[in-house]
Image (spheres, rainbow, N blue to C red):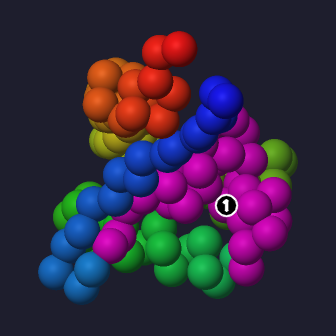
Amino acid sequence: MDLDHRFGVRFTLKGSCGPFFGPGVVRLLCHIRSGLSLNKAAREMRMAYSKAWRIVKEAEKEFGFPLLESSIGGRDGGGSRLTSRGESVLDAYLLIEHQLLETAQRLYDQQLEPLLNPPK
């Protein structure tokens, strides 16, 4: 009987006060990169705006630089966008996450899959 297993790899950066940058913040930043404001990105994720603001500020504090720049009001109604360093951090995280998943898949295929689905 072939078993169909799925797995995930969670990549989280930890700082002085614990985890501060991982899948939740990354997903939020990806929504902002796609053109949503912080408020709309939070709503898209069913997250309170106050929590979204807090987790971004915690990440910025740990990194020591801003991830977002905001504009208030105006003709386009204001909003948020990633800073150039925010873009770089997000790109690096996504690349590492992709490479970790590829490595995990290779290790799974080599080590565990043969034990779970031995040749017939």
Which quarter of the rendering shows the N terminus? Answer: top right
Residue 34 rendering spot, x and y as whole percentages: 68, 35
Please report the bounds of the magenta region as a residue range.
19-48
Q: Is residue 40 magenta?
A: yes
- Main SS, magenta region, reads helix
| Above or below for 43 versus 97 | below
Residue 113 rendering spot, x and y as whole percentages: 44, 29
Question: What secondary structure is found at the residue carrying circle 1?
Answer: helix
Determine whether, in the image, residue 88 is placed left or right of residue 75. left
Q: Nearer the viewer, residue 57 or 23?
A: 23
| Above or below for 78 versus 18 | above
Instruction: Give neighbour class at mark 1: few <14, some 14-19, many 20+ (Cα, 10 Å).
Output: many
What residue sits 51% from the left and 27% below the top?
117
Report which residue position mark 1 lands on.
Answer: 38
Residue 59 rendering spot, x and y as whole percentages: 35, 67
| Above or below for 120 versus 8 | above
Q: Quadrant of residue 52?
A: bottom right
